Image (tube, rainbow, N blue to C red):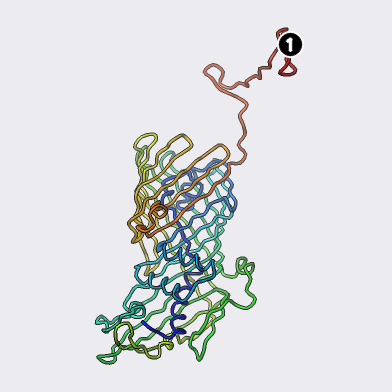
């Protein structure tokens, strides 16, 4: 479809504006959910805190990062061009067109700044500070297909209103977790209290409507709000959106330290052993909301335009710029966080092999989606395990999870992905992601005493070398 360059740029930049906040980043974590002693598993189920070491400590940049996204090829190409400074309007259009083809576009990143854990007779505790970025949007529908169709020769017969739901959030999270074994070797429960400090958000309630005016034309109209809390400057020309720029005086420091947008939330979870070899666990993560009160730039769409079929590759659109006619306001608003529900079954086949099934459901209307993973966890050694299997992530079906977890005397190290195929065969894989990190075990004292059957506790004497005369050697050369 051939539009005026100005209107095409605005149409694409609206979508890219949401995507660019997150830089194409997201979460990958299902592969580690069944591994209760993995340092970041308690963020997926707070009941797993009881499996951590007595004293644990992690700090950025080693404390752990989870990154993942679908639509990986387009995003990777776009980010490469952005970093090299040669992105074009066509690059933005490619991103938008790829999003239109997907039922759901979802991304998330979690970055641990610090985590401190402690196990005691009173229960298991931890304190964490994390950076969270996430995006969910669904642009598929007759309105968006009409806009992106470059060979429109007939008007659509199914005339409907299309919504453009989207949520993009960037916030810092402070949390305190607690877990306790309620029934010995049977039931463990956990809870995590959270405080959120929002940095940036974009929530779309925009919709587009196609209405027939005659046999040969359609009226297009836009309505609804794009709620924004981010340091932007909205530029209009006769109330028509013409540009979006960073606010005057914007600095990275002020953006990252912004604490005016606050919220609260919590996690709940439990782990129950049905038999000595079979355990069932479940959790609710991020039940909460954030109230946005600064850098407010909400846009209410009140636009309209007309479209007519033309010759191949050149449909005719009248007053297309008017689709971006907006009204602005600076009223505070609240957003509920996407809530995630986990449920897992874990069965011990033998002392070295466990099989697990994990289901993850992410809920935020109307963009909820479900994922399922089946993995085997094999203990190669006492302190080394590997995990692999098969997973379905949303509408992505070609996913092979793989993870390695090593627990030494000084700390724990891990690396994993929910889709190994994204690294070895990206052409057949839609989802990509990786998780990695480490933590330290603090205050581990070396025991000076040993045990045997006859002397339960004794201190082993140090045997000193002696010379031929029965005297202690002063150096290795002495005979």
Q: Is residue 244 left or right of residue 101?
A: right
Q: Residue placed at 60% from the left, 77% from the top?
A: 247
> Which structural element holds mark 1?
loop
Tally of numbered tags: 1
Residue 318 figure quarter: bottom left
Q: Nearer the viewer, residue 41 or 334?
A: 41
What residue is disc 1 on?
A: 471
Task: Kindly indicate the quadrant of the structure image that contains residue 432.
Answer: bottom left
Q: Residue furthest top?
A: 469
Residue 187 to residue 382: above or below: below
In this view, 247 is above or below 121: below
Which quadrant would the C terminus be assigned to in this image? Answer: top right
Counting from the top left corner in percent of width and height, residue 135 is at: 45, 66
- Quarter of the rendering containing residue 106: bottom left
Query: Closest to the observer: 206 or 304?
Result: 304
Residue at image position (40%, 39%) is: 378
Single out the residue that lies furthest toward the right.
474
Which percent across, then down, holds residue 256?
Answer: 60, 66
Front residue of 469/192: it is 469
Quarter of the image for the N terminus: give it: bottom left
Left or right of 128 on screen, residue 96: left
Is 186 displayed left or right of 455 in the figure? left
Q: Is residue 477 left or right of residue 171?
A: right
Q: Percent position (x, y) of residue 74?
A: 42, 66
How packed is label 1: few (under 14 Cα within 10 Å), some, or many (20 or more)? few
Residue at 50% across, 84% down: 242
404 vs 343, nearest the viewer: 404
Q: Position of residue 209 (x, y in %)?
A: 34, 83
């Amino acid at each position: 479809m051939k539009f005026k360059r100005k209107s095409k740029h605005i149409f694409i930049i609206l979508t890219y504006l949401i995507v660019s906040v997150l830089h194409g980043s997201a979460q990958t974590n299902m592969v580690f959910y069944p591994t209760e002693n993995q340092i970041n598993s308690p963020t997926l189920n707070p009941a797993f805190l009881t499996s951590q070491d007595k004293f644990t400590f992690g700090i950025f940049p080693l404390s752990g990062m989870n990154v993942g996204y679908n639509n990986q090829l387009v995003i990777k190409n776009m980010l490469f061009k952005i970093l090299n400074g040669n992105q074009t309007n066509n690059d933005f259009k490619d991103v938008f067109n790829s999003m239109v083809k997907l039922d759901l576009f979802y991304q998330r990143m979690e970055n641990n700044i610090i985590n401190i854990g402690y196990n005691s007779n009173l229960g298991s505790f931890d304190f964490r500070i994390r950076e969270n970025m996430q995006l969910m949007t669904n642009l598929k529908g007759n309105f968006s297909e009409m806009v992106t169709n470059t060979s429109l020769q007939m008007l659509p017969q199914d005339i409907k209103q299309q919504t453009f739901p989207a949520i993009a959030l960037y916030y810092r999270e402070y949390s305190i977790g607690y877990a306790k074994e309620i029934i010995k070797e049977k039931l463990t429960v956990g809870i995590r209290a959270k405080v959120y400090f929002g940095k940036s958000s974009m929530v779309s309630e925009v919709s587009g409507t196609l209405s027939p005016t005659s046999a040969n034309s359609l009226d297009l109209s836009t309505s609804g709000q794009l709620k924004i809390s981010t340091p932007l400057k909205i530029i209009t020309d006769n109330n028509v959106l013409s540009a979006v720029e960073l606010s005057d005086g914007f600095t990275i420091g002020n953006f990252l330290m912004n604490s005016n947008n606050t919220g609260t939330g919590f996690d709940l979870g439990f782990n129950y052993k049905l038999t000595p070899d079979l355990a069932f666990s479940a959790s609710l993560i991020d039940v909460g909301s954030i109230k946005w009160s600064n850098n407010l730039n909400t846009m209410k769409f009140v636009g309209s335009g007309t479209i007519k079929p033309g010759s191949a590759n050149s449909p005719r659109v009248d007053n297309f710029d008017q689709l971006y006619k907006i009204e602005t306001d600076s009223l505070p608003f609240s957003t509920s966080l996407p809530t995630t529900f986990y449920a897992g079954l874990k069965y011990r086949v033998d002392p070295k092999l466990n099989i697990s099934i994990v289901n993850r459901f992410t809920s935020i209307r109307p963009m909820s989606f479900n994922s399922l993973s089946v993995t085997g966890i094999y203990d190669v050694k006492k302190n080394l395990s590997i995990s692999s299997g098969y997973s379905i992530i949303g509408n992505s079906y070609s996913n092979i999870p793989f993870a390695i977890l090593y627990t030494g005397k000084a700390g724990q190290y891990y690396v994993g992905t929910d889709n190994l195929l994204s690294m070895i065969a990206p052409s057949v894989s839609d989802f990509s992601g990786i998780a990695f990190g480490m933590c330290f075990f603090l205050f581990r004292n070396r025991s000076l005493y040993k045990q045997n059957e006859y002397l339960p506790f004794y201190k082993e004497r140090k045997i000193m070398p002696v010379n031929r005369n029965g005297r202690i050697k002063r150096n290795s050369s002495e005979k």
